[in-house]
Amino acid sequence: MKRTIHTILNAAVLIALLVGLGAMLPVQGMAKTVKPKAPKATVTPVPAQDIHLALAKESKLWLEGNSTLHPFKADATLMEASFEVSQAGLGKAKNAAELFHKIIDAGAVKKFTLNITVLGLKSGDEGLDKNMYPALKADKNPVIKFELQNYQASPLTATAQGAMFVASEGKLTIGGKENAIKMSPKVSVGDDGIHIAGSQEVIMTDYGIQPPSMMFVINVDKKVVIKFDLLVRLQKTEK
């Protein structure tokens, strides 16, 4: 009887040892559960090759002037732009905003031409428009043209983060007469494009244009201000 009890106790101890050892060892055939790691966020680089810029339809340009009767404004409803961008040394960018910064900082815009159709200038006053078109010599010179010659960007203060003034030189043609001009529009860059805003004072007589008058009573001041708020984007090209 004592031997039987002793045998049972030894067997129990052996079973307990085997069970404990089994708990510490992986069970054959059972896959170890591994928690998957979250994938790292990837940034699609924007190549600097085949860069084409275009003027967005949200772009605005208008003329402001004064007369003996009241101030006036004429919106440009028809305008188009062309760009030439040098891709040398630009490399790849993390996103569109970085690419735009690279283009401006490197002086990569080698050509920028803006054409404004004179008959597309609309003031909302048919009488004013009727006198404005002949004064601007729309019949022989249907387009007001600006051509960029060179520019240099200078960062603004921290109060206008991401923006800069761009000292620009170019040629402005009105009524067939071309003059050199200088201006410093404010430029800001984002993923949606390059925003260019500013103004340029123009003396019409410098372009051989006599300010229109109506019935010798209403006279238009010779000074006109061209104001603009342009948006330039990457142009999608068909492959």
Image (cartoon, rainbow, N blue to C red):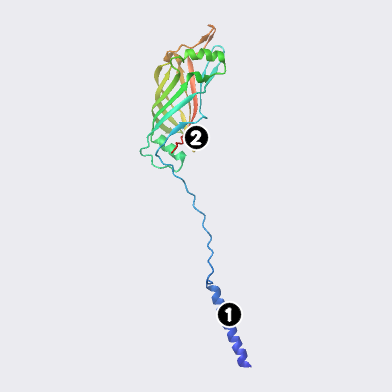
Q: Residue at x 51, y 9 (%)?
A: 213
Q: Say which quarter of the image contains residue 33.
A: bottom right
Question: Residue placed farthest to the top in the image?
Answer: 216
SS type, badge 1? helix
Residue 16 percent location from the top left of the image = 58, 80
**In which quadrant is the N terminus drawn?**
bottom right
Would residue 6 be found to the left or right of residue 191 on screen?
A: right
Left/right placement of residue 70 relative to residue 45 reads right
Secondary structure found at label 2: helix
Q: Quadrant of residue 27?
A: bottom right
Q: Residue at x 58, y 85 (%)?
A: 11
Q: Identify whether 196 is placed above or below 145.
A: below
Neighbours of disc 2 within 10 Å: few (<14), some (14-19), many (20+): few
In the displayed structure, would residue 172 be above or below residue 88? above
Q: Looking at the picture, how far across and down is residue 32, in whole percent?
A: 53, 66
Q: Nearer the viewer, residue 19 or 186?
A: 19
Q: Which mark is residue 134?
A: none
Vertical placement of residue 95 versus 176, above or below: below
Q: Which residue is mark 1?
A: 16
Classed neighbour count for the residue bearing mark 1: other residues with Cα under 10 Å, few (<14), some (14–19), many (≥20): few
The quadrant of the image that shows the C terminus is top left
Q: As shown in the figure, which amino acid type bears the numbered disc 1?
A: Ala
Residue ID at (58%, 81%): 15
Q: Residue furthest front?
A: 239
The residue type indicated by label 2 comes to Ala
Pointer 2: what residue? 160
Where residue 89 appears, as percent x and y from the top left, is 36, 39
Q: Earlier in the sequence, mark 2 or mark 1?
A: 1
Q: Residue furthest right?
A: 1
Tell me how many marks there are: 2
Q: How far apart are the alpha carbons under marks 2 and 1?
A: 75 Å
Residue 5 screen position, x and y as percent: 62, 89
